[in-house]
Amino acid sequence: MRFDILTVLSLVLSTLTAGCDGDFASRSEILDYRVLGLEADPPEVGPEGSVRLTAHDLDPEGRPVSYAWTLCLYSVGPLVDFACADPALAFDLQGGRTVDLDLAAYDLRAFVDALGGVPRADGTFATLSDGFDVYVVLESGPAAGPRTRSVKRVRVREGGDPNRNPTAALRVSAERAAPGSTVTLTVVPGPDARETFDGAEGGRATEELVYAWYSTGGELASALTYGDDAEVELDLPAEPGPVDVALAVRDGRGGLAVVTRRIEVE
Amino acid sequence: MFVSLSKPDSARAATRTALALLLVTAGLLARDAAAAEGQLTRPPELLEFVQAPYPAEAQAAGVTGAVTLLLTIEADGAVSAVEVTEPAGHGFDAAAAEAARAFVFRPAEIDGQPAPVQIAYRYAFTLAEAPAVVSTGTLVVRLVERGTRKPLAAITVRAGDAEAVSDAEGVVRFAELPEGPLRLEVRDPAFVTVEDRETIRAGEEVTVTWRLERTGFADDLEAVGRRPAKEVTRRTLSVQEIRTVPGTNGDALRVVQNLPGVARAPFGLGGLVLRGGGESRAYLEGHPIPTPFHFGLRSTVSTALIESIDLYPGNHGPEFGRGNGGIVDIRLRKPGRDGWHGYGEVDLFDAGAFLEAPVGEKGGIALGARRSYIDALVPLLLTDEQLDAFPVAPRYYDYQALYQTDLSGGHDLRLMAFGGGDRTVFLVEEPADTDPAVRGKADLELDWVGGQAEWGWRVAPDARHRLSAGYVFEAQRGALGKDLAFDYDMHRVTVRDDVEVKAAEWLKVRGGADLEVEHIRATVSLPPPTKDGETAAPVGATGVLKSDSTETWFMPAAWAELELTWGDLTVLPGFRADYWTIVDAVALQPRATARYKVTDDTTVKGGVGLYSERPDLDEVDPVFGDPSVGLERSVHYSAGVEQRLGEYLTADLVGFYKDFDDLVTRTDDADEGSTGFANQGEGRAYGLEALLRLENHPRLYGWVAYTLMRSERRDAPGDDWRLFGSDQTHNVTVVGNYKLSTTWELGLRWRFVSGNPYTPIERGTYDSDADAYVPVPGAPLSRRLEPFHQLDLRVDKHWIFDAWRMTTYLDVQNAYLRQNPEGVTYNFDFTEQAIIGGLPLVPSFGVRGEF
């Protein structure tokens, strides 16, 4: 295949036709157990640093959920389901919804030295100062419900200005509302939510925040908004009851914040 | 006394002259009493006779007669009174009396003195043949076709008893035709019979122009210059077939998709997958076409310039190379030299114009251009809000200019320039649930410009040399959102030198060299391309790879072929050698075909050959691929039979097997220094192609094409065989076109194609950073969509005027509204799937005026 117009055109066509069956539920509707995101705090750490991993998930039925975490020092990537390149590079992590990961236990320096640099997809090799990703895999779900396999990259980099998770608050226009009414959800990014960083092309760049909206009932006007588009409307269901809404804020560099609120429909 | 008078001789031939006989009887009567007593000393003497005109009625009836008159002659000799005493009728009486009144006599004398008398006078009318007169004239008849004004050669014209055949200019000349009315007639089965009368005038040349109307509407019913077959399989389409096959809008390369061995492309888009895969190449007079399709919709070569298209689904000769698939070879026609011609046409998508004219006595020029007007319609059809999503509506255009001339000494020259472009910009504001990273502005642009020059020389009656060169510059730019972009420029120079010599009755030798040089600069930021059988992952999960490269491919080749004939057996051993830089590889490719004419109507044939192609450009790119990968190779086998079944029907049955080796596939592990590609794959494609074809019939053409095929791949040693992505077990196409009359045509196309294989998605893994589920595929291409079948109908109406003609057509695709499956789509986490349906009923309307 050539690098040609059909490459991008096919991407666009697949985008335009994906989910074109109107019967699919929107990704914003939480109908069953769902992982909204895996948070690594911090998302970028030195080779001997510590990271707290948190699974942000939501089960409309409130069932107990089990978690099984695995660390893979080098993954072959998404085209082979994030398989670990070698079983010797995979490690089970103990914990529940939250796990503390101490990277010092895995001697990443020796690992990088042994490889002569961590291979990248473009055929180059990454050093500790360049930074590379270790992968965290989570198998989670309620005992009698769907199991979800989720993956999170933790950036390991020595030196530089490490990325931080964004902070944000979620405002709802009404915590109690009538059935069938509409409420407005507003994200309020924290003062330091949009970081500036050294761009790949050189120069400084500013993060663009991406907001993913979820609800366990009703219908959201948009599933994703970006940047300054910080509001979305929620049409509440006709039946009374609690509706949980969630917002996942991503900074495009592995940083994540998840905020949830509850609206009582009565 | 009897006097006979006749008119003097004249230039006319064979006239009839009325003769008047004058009879003076001896009976004279005195007019008055005074004279009655004297002695008649001298009778009256007729000095001036007056010829009476022969009455037309009597002459036409061939009647003669005599009128007896009583004339009163005065003393001065004048006739003062005339009385008809014995009438003859038929107009004779009045004619004779009128003439007699003008007689002049010497008066009679009584006793020596002039005196009035009365005499009886008998005026007789008789008919007699005049001597024959020979007088001739010349008639020139010029024959042109009504509507096109094209001169009509080899048409027989009858002029009276004479007969002649029109020359190449459509002119027939009759000399020395007898003067007078003449009956003319043209009676030819291809044209409406014409009968007329012309009057030939002596010593003059009369020129008439007749516009003959065809009984059929045969645009080049026979492919012009159809070459003898030497290959196992070569299928040729004529201009008429190209123009009128339903569902193709007269698009030449899309019509090819209706022939055996050609896979159907999803959504009816353009694409060439021949006999189960391998790169297939499209050529324009031996030089590769830069971009065969606009956005996959319309081909980039104007049909007006095309004489014919040859499809070689496999086992082609050594003159073509650099591909493991098949060949589509477009041959251009010579611009017309019989005057100015052209057309303008408009259909649902675009408008085009074409003009051709003679240049000198032996040359001609043709100009064509086409532009889409979807971008002009979009602002009229969309609301302002919808319009915001289309900053630049899709548009495409192309143009061609062709000059060809015959030169003295058996030389000929062809020059061609062409170019075109595609552009669209639109906004993806709401990304798909399955790939949130694909959003933003999509800006796609493609432009190309180039030319060809060809010099041909018929060195001797049995020897021909052809040298040609081509140049193309192609630029492609695209961007989607902030992460996806490519910027690609290519300069390609191609040179071909082909020689053919008939060394003996049993031996022809062909050979040549061809060179392709590509200089490519590419700056790319794209996700890794998916290969056959692979499932794409969201861009947010894979990320993009960036590459900035400049490279030059130098690809020389040489080839030779013998054509050996022993009686009914023809054997063609050949050889081709290719070299590619970058991969630094040589391919030595022996090939051979054989044809044996069992009877005049039956030919058996077979062939075997080696073929090669370079890896895809992304596969050798140091970022996207692996520079160490090498050529992909294949062996083609085929055998079959051709059978003529009557005057119009032929059948062609071919079995084939293709063996692919050294296919570049992705390795499971990323080796140090590479990104996981190797020449470790293999493949096989085998099947049967059948074609039953009706052609050369004045009112009907069509064919039934059936391909039964299996195409499989194995991505690595030890892997299971899997289906190829375009494997279509059954592919049936029925095409028919019938001329109801000289002005109405009906066409249909019905297709049945096995559904394409697809890879089922078992589940999705949630990529938290991409906020998207990455599909986890099941066995590659292990499921198949439901079959595709569709009926397309077309009706053409022609109006033929003296100097031009107009055609309108209505083309309806998917006439019975079949909801054909074209693909599979999933919800955001791949727990639900749905079928993507094809286009519903698609009507298309076109108008064309040509002169």
Image: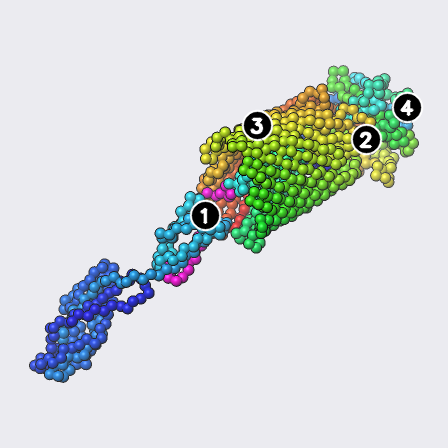
Circle number at residue A110: 4
Q: Note whether residue A244 is visible.
A: no
Asked if the magenta segment contains residue A245, the reply would be no
**Are both tags, 1 and 4, on one chain?**
no
Q: Tell me the subunit letter for badge 1.
A: B
Q: Is residue B671 left or right of residue A160?
A: left
**Number of residues whose C-alpha sits closer than 10 Å to that of mark 4, classed few (under 14), some (14–19) or many (20 or more):** few
Task: Give the quarter of the image for residue B299.
Answer: top right
Measure the C-alpha gap from mark 3 to mark 1: 41 Å
The region drawn magenta spans B200-221
Circle 1: element type = loop
Residue B591 % position (x, y): 63, 31
In percent of width and height, residue A152 lies at 81, 25
Figure check: B36 above or below B353:
below
Callout 4 secondary element: helix
- In the image, what residue type sits under mark 1? Ala
Alpha-carbon span between mark 3 and mark 4: 62 Å
Letter of the chain that mark 3 sits on in the rendering: B
Marks 3 and 4 on same chain: no
Q: Which residue is mark 3?
A: B639
Q: Is residue B106 visible?
A: yes
Which residue is pictured at 68% across the width and 32% down the height? Answer: B588
* Badge 1 density bin: few <14, some 14–19, many ≥20, Cα 10 Å: some
| Residue at (74% x, 28% y) in the render | B537
Residue hosting label 1: B154
Mark 2 and mark 3: Cα distance apart in space: 46 Å
Check disc 2 and report the residue beneath it. Answer: A123
**Are labels 2 and 1 on one chain?**
no
Which residue sits at x=25%, y=59%? Answer: B60
Q: Is residue B206 magenta?
A: yes
Q: Nearer the viewer, residue B373 or B546?
A: B546
